[in-house]
Amino acid sequence: MTLTERSPVEITGSQARPEPGYEALNPGYPRAWWTIGWSGDVKPGRVASLRILERDLVLWRDSTGAVHCQAAHCAHLGVHIGQGGSVVGDTVRCPFHGWCYDASGRLAAVPGHDRLREDVCLPTFRVVERYGALFAWNGAGEPDFDFPDILAEAGFPEEDVVFAHHRWYLPFPAKWFGENLCDGMHFAVAHDTAEWGETIIESESPTVMRMRNVIYNRHKWLGWANVKKRFRRGELVNLLTPVTNDILSTCWGGPLHLVRFADRPHILGNIIACWTPVDADSHLVMDVTLIPRLRLPGGPMVEKAIGFAAGLGNWSTAIQDAGLMMNRAEPANPPYHVRDRGLIAFRRFWDSRIVADGPLDGDNLRSNGARAGIRVKDRP
Amino acid sequence: MKKQPVLYGAALAAVAVAWRRAHSSDVTSLRKVANSKGITTWTAWRKSRVG
């Protein structure tokens, strides 16, 4: 058969019809809530586009202000709706031929045609808006846990808190960064806070892990020697984030963390952190820092200044990890040490949240596959 | 009043020496390693923008 003798395209509708409903963003990543953006990214009447979990998405608000998250490419001819698309009533409109989709992904209108195909559907994803941020559920159907009340976990009433949002793009896999919260030794060594550290798993369930990163023999933080060292390393801003005690982390489903400092009963210093993949080898650091609400004249301005300073402090810590991660090449079977117990527990937890048809083949970027079951040889 | 230029000069020299020592030290800095690969506060923030 030559190129001019192709058989006609079959359009009899024999293919399985897609049903409107929530889909998984990417089943290769854990079923969990992922921080995907900030509320301010999605302005009324506008279509925002972003790439998350190796998928192109659009975000838009309907007339009630509710945010909707859908696949970016029109089901018709695949044009990116985020580039020139618009919100029309309670639908999002493709800029190519004007196909409109409602919040459930159904085709709602086609210009000049009132009989709509029922087998056309735009993949739609479950999204919630909390704490000035947008969180998407990576999974089809109903979530196996609701979006957590993170402030209740932190122990602060919502009316006492405002949120500072920071986001950075880094060119290495998200999981490498996220799992650092279960790696107490790195808090001591890589961040130069103490002689050594370890992670203690305080509680674990199929959906939540609570960890305590303990550091031993801390360096003196507020002292001339440390100031001199930070200056020489070009990390003076790092003085804004003193690690004076253990670091607590609550992890929901793998990617979503609440990070706290054990000795600070105060709001400042609590971070809702998520490392959201863009592609397999790049990610966004999504950091929501809790700031105390100041009920005094000019309070919002001071809150913003504190939030900005907190962001710089968080970044000064993140870039220390970035310096290590961008050239990292983890061996296929790492020689785990007994102090890696927290890390191993987290890797198992991460893999337990992945529902994939194919076997997890040890691809370290998305999951740990077979390696998640590895045993520590020198268990005491 | 006449001593002021000398004081300013001494302060400037002290800053210059400190700056020079900081940048000629052999202390490994992860921030500098990241910066050398183009990961700076500015680039990481700019590339994260959602449009």
Image: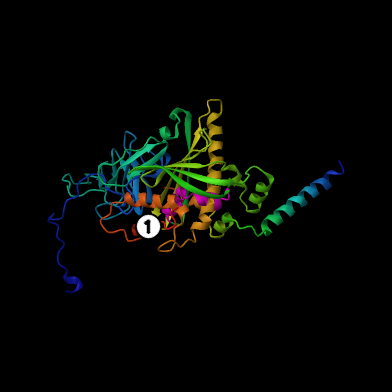
Res. A83 visible in picture: no
Residue A177 lies in the magenta stretch:
yes
What chain does badge 1 belong to?
Answer: A
Q: Nearer the viewer, residue A327 or A196?
A: A196
Q: What secondary structure is marked by label 1?
A: loop
- Looking at the picture, how far across and down is residue A261, in whole percent? 51, 39
Task: Categorize mark 1 by other alpha carbons within 10 Å: few (<14), some (14-19), many (20+).
Answer: few
Query: With A332 as the anchor, is A96 left or right in this view?
Result: left
Query: With A10 as the anchor, is A347 left or right in this view?
Result: right
Q: Nearer the viewer, residue A377 or A245?
A: A377
**Image quadrant in which the N terminus of chain A is located:** bottom left
Residue A285 lies in the magenta stretch:
no
- Looking at the picture, how far across and down is residue A201, in whole percent? 42, 44
Residues in magenta?
A173-193
Task: Say which residue label 1 marks.
Answer: A374
Up/down of B12 relative to A39, above or below: below
Mark 1: amino acid: Ile
- Looking at the picture, how far across and down is residue A233, in whole percent? 63, 53
Q: Residue furthest bottom?
A: A2
Q: Nearer the viewer, residue A352 or A241?
A: A352
Q: Residue furthest right?
A: B2
Q: Residue furthest front?
A: A380
Res. A234 visible in picture: yes
Q: Main secondary structure of the magenta part?
A: helix
- Looking at the picture, how far across and down is residue A331, in whole percent? 43, 63
